[in-house]
Image (tube, rainbow, N blue to C red):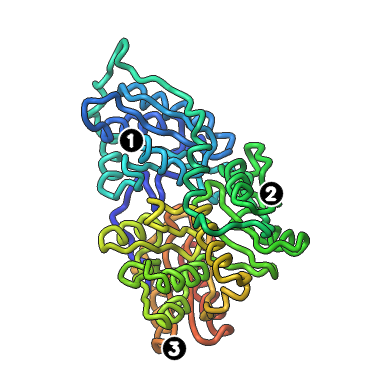
Amino acid sequence: MTYRPEKKRKLFGTDGVRGVANEHPMTTEIAMQLGRAIAYISRRGAHRHRIVVGKDTRVSCYMLEQALSAGVCSMGVDVLLSGPIPTPAVAFLARTMRADAGVMISASHNPFQDNGIKFFGHDGFKLDDAIEAEIEELLAESRIDDIRPTATAVGKVYRLDDARGRYVQFVKDVFDPKLSLEGMKLVVDCAHGASYIVAPQIFRELGAEVVAVGVGPDGKNINEQCGAVHPEGLQATVKLHGAHAGIALDGDADRLIVVDEKGEVVDGDAVMAICGRDMVKAGQLSENTVVTTVMSNMGLDKCLAEVGAKTVRTQVGDRYVVEHMRAHGYNFGGEQSGHLVFLDQSSTGDGCVAALRLLEVAAREEKPLSELSKVFERVPQRLVNIAVKKKVPLEELPKTSRLIREIEAKLQGTGRVLVRYSGTENKARVMVEGENADDTQRYAQDIAAVLGLELGGES
């Protein structure tokens, strides 16, 4: 399976606008224009319009928050600032406060020098491609340049002082009230990011003994050798403290990676397997279907098939998972990377919600995570990332395309090849699955080497 690029968008990737802070497109000028555009397209009805604006802990969030807020206010729309808070909290607040939209300033799992801006509608769902395209058109044209309210018609900025408390209570309500986390020791790694206050509080208030790490943000240590993309430290800390589990969130807490009591990683595929099977057992999984992406391991399909469930795959990006769920009436899905969406509770990926749903299974079954995760047997899979300066369509790379076809023929239907460009980073991703681990690794490295050479040696 190969990557086929869609119509090129100049600003938006698979998860909003992202780049190096203070370089195009992540400049204050663009942030202000984006603020004006989202304010223009999100206004509904005759009420005083409001947009919730959240952020993570990057030092660049200060300038982008101010610039974006200025743009929103210049269109006569008020801003509700939540301060550092998880991305799913912004979606929740936009929906429950009946705001016109929500905006999160974060580059998620990227290093601190990057930043990003992602948008939610009044219903708490990410904007679809068509609306993002409309925003790009508004920035490229001059249709709204003359909309300049004056005097009392300009927007105001308010601090939403109870934003964290609202979100903490919402997440706690997800957990089965007949169960408790008492007697459970958890290591919670917040990646020095947006969840550094709320995540430990959520688990403590549900009764767990919490060892909190990654809770000292300084503006530049977000995701630095910690959190969901670097679980190595969490693995060691879980074993050191004899914890029952480790919870790793990324910089904006919309993804989750778990570590079991033995220090082994339980990724998004394993969590989907455990929770999906549990939902089937309880009669809660709509259409007995889990929606995931092309990156999920083939072992997930087999695991769910054992209980009469199936997977449906979308292109990479949790927004596309959610879009497919909404379009077809499904209620659970996610990504191997840890974006997990329980649509009955949340409109977007939420690391804290996902962690509680998993811990709920462990508490109800009275089994350790290492025992629960045995239901998921992973097919050997190898992923190789290559740094690229430009994203050339694969059909324009004959050597790479030819090698992919040759390897697909060797796999004879027992595995998969997926080559795609990242929508959030300047990287190409080569993924190969197959029955033989050594062959899988060799095939992935061979494709990556040829791809790197054909792109000009940027690997």
Q: Give residue 355's position: percent from left, percent from top.
A: 54, 58
Figure check: 143 above or below 103 = above
> Which residue occupies the extreme top position in the image?
151
- Near mark 3 (Cα within 10 A), the count class, few <14, some 14-19 or many ≥20, is few
Choose top left, top right, bottom left or bottom right for residue 124: top left
Q: Tell which tag, 2 or 3, sits nearer the viewer.
A: 2
Looking at the picture, does residue 61 appear above or below residue 237?
Answer: above
| Residue labelled with disc 2 | 212
Which of label 3 and label 1 is nearer to you?
Answer: 1
Answer with the quarter of the image where residue 90 lies.
top left
**Do the residues bearing badges 2 and 3 touch, measured as CB atoms within 8 Å?**
no
Return the residue nearer the eye: 332 or 431.
Answer: 332
Please provide percent x and percent y for residue 397: 39, 69
Residue 98, label in figure: 1
Q: Distance between the residues labelled 3 and 1?
A: 54 Å
Mark toward the start of the polypeptide (2 vs 3): 2
User: To which residue does mark 3 refer?
Assistant: 410
Horizontal side, residue 166 vs residue 16: left or right: right
Q: Residue 344 appears at what percent x and percent y?
A: 37, 56
Kind of residue sitting beneath label 2? Ala
**How many C-alpha atoms fall within 10 Å of the one at disc 1: few (<14), some, or many (≥20)?**
some
Proximity of marks 3 and 1: CB atoms separated by less than 8 Å:
no
Q: How many labels does the image show?
A: 3
The C terminus lies in quadrant:
bottom right
Position of the N terminus by quadrant: bottom left
- Give the crowd class for mark 2: few <14, some 14-19, many >=20 residues within 10 Å: some
At label 3, the amino acid type is: Lys
Name the residue at 28% across, 55% down. Answer: 7
